[in-house]
């Protein structure tokens, strides 16, 4: 693929972020051609480098699948921003850049002299994107946290789980993976377009809690209009029945270390037409003609029994069988897939080539997420796997910061490049 076909070719990004929301945003930019320098430090290594899963039989900072998945296509520069010279070099990197990106807290940004007011003195046209957890002002300005804190703060955890049980949450740091990085990407692209038209950069502030809260529009509208605070409802929906996860045939000995593996499917019926189709797929058993299930209201009032009877049918079948028969009949249904299913067994994702396999010098050949969206005219691609810690420090110092070998050696001695 010719590199000049990538839509962000020529855009230079200084990625001063860590963990999820910032690096994912920058990784998508790298996928579509931007040159991204990921600034890290051995004095405080990005926590994702230390988290499992690690490549089989490997340990160290360079083999975390979690970190590597979010940092493909970038250069890695180790720079100690707690030194005066390190902060000067950070400003030199900003001078080279079109976009500056960080998700550190406001107090850290101020200490490292990386505020927008600091950066425009170095590069007046810089687009500086900040992702503070709760913004640069307000009573919670300096609160600490990650996606696991944002999920309850933004209101997700209150709605996830079952009635009369504690909030469960989404099971992943959902704001980090989807909402915050893509909102930031959209803002950066808008700012790049504005600068192309006017020659002016700007400051982007994405308060992560606000970015996440906007995804709860229906619940907020329900409170605004009806004065009702929605509660946890498990897998159920107020406008569908059945709507839930149902046990399917267990795979004997197929689980971790030879344990039995539970398999599940999901079924969502929104209309009477879909309900009748579900009944036909199940073979029109006698219980489906019971008055307790004749209407949507009746099915909602008898949902416990409805789910029990449906599961008696699904438990005799594989989730694949359930999904295929329901989809053929026009009923929304799917497999509850585990990681193995998604990566290796799902024929749809495999045929579409969603996962990109790259050869990493330490982790070996591993799967990476692609960008999550596709452009027909200017498709993207990763130029390289995720970098090892500090792998490109010499390259960045020589080719971008224009330092001599003697200067680089002294910076290593002074522990600035670490």
Image (spheres, rainbow, N blue to C red):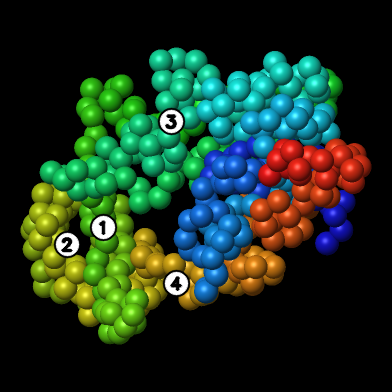
Return the residue at label 3. Answer: 144
Question: Which circle's residue, 1 or 3, is located before the other in the chain?
Answer: 3
Question: Which circle's residue, 2 or 3, is located before the other in the chain?
Answer: 3
- Spot the residue most to the front: 413
Q: Residues within 10 Å of mark 3 (few under 14, many from 20)?
A: few
Return the residue at label 1. Answer: 244
Identified at 14% across, 61% down, the residue is: 306
Q: Quadrant of the C terminus?
A: top right
Kind of element beneath mark 1: strand
**Could you say which quadrant of the image residue 217 lies in?**
top left
Whole-number angstrom distance, CA of label 1 to CA of label 3: 35 Å
Question: Where residue 65 appears, x then y in whole percent?
Answer: 55, 61
**Could you say which quadrant of the image residue 72 lies in?**
bottom right
Question: Where residue 19 appears, x then y in whole percent?
Answer: 54, 45
**Could you say which quadrant of the image residue 38 lies in?**
top right
Question: Which circle's residue, 4 or 3, is located before the other in the chain?
Answer: 3
Query: Mark 2 and 4 residues: CB-CB less than 8 Å, in contact?
Result: no
Identified at 40% across, 67% down, the residue is: 338
Residue 55 appears left or right of 215: right
Identified at 76% across, 43% down, the residue is: 413
Whole-number angstrom distance, CA of label 2 to CA of label 3: 42 Å
Whole-number angstrom distance, CA of label 2 to CA of label 1: 8 Å
Residue 341: numbered disc: 4
Whole-number angstrom distance, CA of label 4 to CA of label 3: 35 Å
Q: Residues within 10 Å of mark 4 (few under 14, many from 20)?
A: few
Query: Mark 4 and 3 residues: CB-CB less than 8 Å, in contact?
Result: no
Eye-nearest disc, 1 or 3: 3
Question: Which circle's residue, 4 or 1, is located before the other in the chain?
Answer: 1
Return the residue at label 2. Answer: 307
Residue 21: numbered disc: none
């Amino acid at each position: 693929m010719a590199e000049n076909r990538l839509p962000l070719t020529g855009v230079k990004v200084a990625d001063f972020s860590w963990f999820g929301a910032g690096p994912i945003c920058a990784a998508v930019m790298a996928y579509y051609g931007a040159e991204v320098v990921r600034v890290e430090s051995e004095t405080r290594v990005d926590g994702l480098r230390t988290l499992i899963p690690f490549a089989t039989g490997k340990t160290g900072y360079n083999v975390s699948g979690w970190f590597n998945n979010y940092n493909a296509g970038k250069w890695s520069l180790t720079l100690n921003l707690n030194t005066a010279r390190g902060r000067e070099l950070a400003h030199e990197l900003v001078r080279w850049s079109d976009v500056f990106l960080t998700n550190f807290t406001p107090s850290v940004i101020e200490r490292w002299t990386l505020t927008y007011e600091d950066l425009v003195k170095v590069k007046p046209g810089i687009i500086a994107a900040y992702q503070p957890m709760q913004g640069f002002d307000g009573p919670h300005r300096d609160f600490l946290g990650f996606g696991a804190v944002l999920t309850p703060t933004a209101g997700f955890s209150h709605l996830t789980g079952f009635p009369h049980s504690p909030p469960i949450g989404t099971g992943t740091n959902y704001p980090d993976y989807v909402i915050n990085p893509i909102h930031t990407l959209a803002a950066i692209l808008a700012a790049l377009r504005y600068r192309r038209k006017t020659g002016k950069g700007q400051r982007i502030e994405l308060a992560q809690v606000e970015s996440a809260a906007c995804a709860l529009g229906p619940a907020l509208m329900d409170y605004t209009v009806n004065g009702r605070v929605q509660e946890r409802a498990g897998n159920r929906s107020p406008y569908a029945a059945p709507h839930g996860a149902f046990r399917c045939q267990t795979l004997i000995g197929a689980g971790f270390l030879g344990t039995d593996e539970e398999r599940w499917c999901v079924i969502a019926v929104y209309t009477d037409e879909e309900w009748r189709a579900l009944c036909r797929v199940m073979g029109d058993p006698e219980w489906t003609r019971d008055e307790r299930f004749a209407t949507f209201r009746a099915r909602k009032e008898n949902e416990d029994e409805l789910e029990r009877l449906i599961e008696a049918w699904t438990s005799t079948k594989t989730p694949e069988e359930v999904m295929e028969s329901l989809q053929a009949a026009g009923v929304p249904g799917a497999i509850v897939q585990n990681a193995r299913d998604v990566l290796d067994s799902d024929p749809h994702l495999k045929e579409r080539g969603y996962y990109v396999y790259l050869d990493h010098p330490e982790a070996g050949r591993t799967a990476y997420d692609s960008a999550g969206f596709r452009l027909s005219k200017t498709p993207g691609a990763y130029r390289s796997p995720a970098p090892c810690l500090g792998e490109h420090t010499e390259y960045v110092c020589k080719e971008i910061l224009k330092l001599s070998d003697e200067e680089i050696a002294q910076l290593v001695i002074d522990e600035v490049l670490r």
